[in-house]
Structures are given as C-alpha cells and as structure tokens.
Image (tube, rainbow, N blue to C red):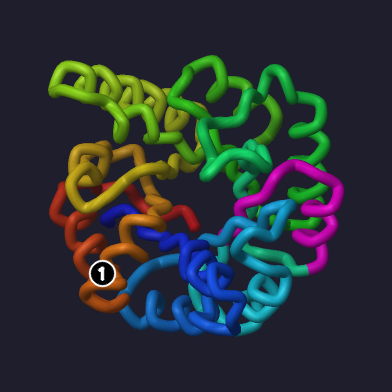
C-alpha cells in the first residue's frame, strides 16, 4: 500500500489572519482535502495562535472524517487541550515564537524528562504520539526508549541541500533513519519543506508510511484549486514506488 498523505492546512489560516477576516476557513479547506483523496489533516496549534485557533481544532475534531494530527509543543496548556479534544494523533514539535516555521527536530535527549512525561499523559488518554526528529539515529533510539509510537523525520536538511552530492547525502541519512526506526517498531512519517519537485526521492523509501505536507500544497491550491493540488501530490507519492503498509 502506498504511503499516506496528510495535508497541513495551517496556511489557510495564515491567509485568514493576514486580513483579520473569518475566511478562508480551515474547516472548509479540510473538507476539500478529504474529497480530493488525502488520508489525514494536520494542524499546528501554536502558543501564539499565529494561524490555527482553538475554534478550528474543535470544529475539525467534530467534522473531519480523516485522521486528525495535532502538532504541538510539549507544554501543559497544549497537553490539556489535546486531552480535551482527543485528536487521533499528536505530533510533538519544538517551538519558538520568533521562528517563521519549525526549524528542526526535537532534541529528545536534552528535553527527555519533559517529553517523556508528555508522551505518558497522552498515551494514557489513548492518543497516539509521534515525535518530530531529525534523521539522527541517536534521537530515534531515544524516541523508542520513551515509548513514542511514531516518528516524523524532518526532511528540511534534504530540501535545503544544494547540488546532487549534498542532496544524495541527506537522502542517505533519511534512509538510514527510516530503516532504524522501522526495525525498532516505530511507524515512520516524514515532512518539512517537501514540495512537488523533491518529494518523489523520499517517497521511494519503503519504510516511510506517511507524509505531512502543507505549504507547497496550499501554495499550489491558490493557483489550481485544492482538489487538483492534493491529487497531484497523492499521485507523486503513489508513482514513486513506496510500498509502506498502513498501521493506522
């Protein structure tokens, strides 16, 4: 079975925020994503509420028929919200107010105590937990030790690589990380910076079962419509030969 595509709709809310209007509505966007054949909806509820709002999360939980993936920092406020709303999966990510977007993976060794506590609380609430990490073998082994069920490999370094040699080196890191995580029994996802030109190379990695892609799809949707933008990305993933099985 081909890898799943989860579409991050944060930047629908970014456009709404830019003018302080009630539109475009991420909830409406999620319905179009679902009709276009995606497998899940991803949103990041940030501390500063720069795009997605609490209202969006609650309405999406009520209306989305797909898997709902909530990206969030490992803070008491966010754990409380997740505990109340019960998304299908929570992806723990690092977060800084001054960053434009998430800049890299969690350092599970430095923040192990906080993340372990968060993982335990969420799993007790029967919420699946994914950990957003760099393709670093030490981080992946720690993810396994603290009972993470899934990892999302940060593909940002690959996407920002210049030249064929550097890109090949970064893909190799992702391959090694995916294989290691799979051997440890972790579900493997990938995301960050992926677009219509660079996704195919990563989608060929059979251990990767899920992709979280947002900015590129929303940007494409502005020009060709949401349905076409999502279907084009689904086709790239399917045509790339990845054969990961679904454990969702």
Q: Judge left or right: residue 93 versus residue 239.
A: right
Membership of 78 in magenta stretch: yes
Res 203 seen here: yes
Q: Residue 146: which quarter of the image?
A: top right
Q: Which residue is mark 1?
A: 229
**Residue under the point 36% across and 59% down:** 5
Q: Position of residue 195 (x, y in %)?
A: 27, 50
In magenta, the rendered stretch is: 69-84
Q: Position of residue 111 (x, y in %)?
A: 74, 24
Q: How many marks?
A: 1
**Residue under the point 64% across and 43% down:** 92
Q: Nearer the viewer, residue 225 or 67?
A: 225
Q: Is residue 235 above or below residue 228?
A: above
Numbered disc 1: secondary structure: helix
Q: Is residue 173 above or below residue 34?
A: above
Membership of 4 in magenta stretch: no
**Residue under the point 39% across and 50% down:** 210
Instruction: Indicate the quadrant containing the N terminus: top left, top right, bottom left or bottom right.
Output: bottom left
């Amino acid at each position: 079975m081909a890898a799943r595509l989860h579409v991050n709709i944060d930047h629908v809310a970014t456009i709404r925020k830019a003018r302080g209007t009630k539109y475009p509505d991420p909830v409406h966007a999620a319905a179009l994503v679902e009709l276009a054949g995606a497998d899940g909806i991803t949103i990041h509820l940030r501390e500063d509420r720069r795009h997605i709002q609490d209202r969006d999360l609650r309405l999406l939980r009520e209306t989305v028929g797909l898997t709902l993936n909530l990206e969030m920092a490992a803070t008491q406020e966010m754990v409380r919200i997740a505990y109340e709303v019960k998304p299908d999966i929570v992806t723990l990510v690092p977060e800084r107010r001054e960053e434009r977007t998430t800049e890299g993976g969690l350092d599970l060794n430095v923040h192990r105590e906080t993340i372990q506590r968060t993982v335990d609380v969420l799993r007790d609430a029967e919420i699946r937990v994914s950990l957003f990490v760099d393709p670093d073998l030490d981080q992946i082994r720690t993810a396994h030790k603290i009972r993470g069920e899934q990892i999302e490999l940060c593909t940002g370094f690959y996407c920002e690589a210049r030249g064929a040699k550097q890109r090949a080196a970064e893909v190799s890191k992702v391959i090694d990380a995916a294989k290691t995580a799979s051997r440890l029994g972790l579900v493997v996802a990938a995301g960050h910076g992926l677009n219509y030109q660079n996704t195919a190379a990563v989608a060929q990695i059979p251990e990767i079962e899920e992709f979280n892609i947002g900015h590129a799809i929303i940007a494409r949707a502005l020009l060709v419509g949401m349905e076409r933008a999502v279907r084009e990305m689904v086709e790239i993933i399917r045509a790339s030969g990845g054969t990961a099985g679904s454990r969702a």
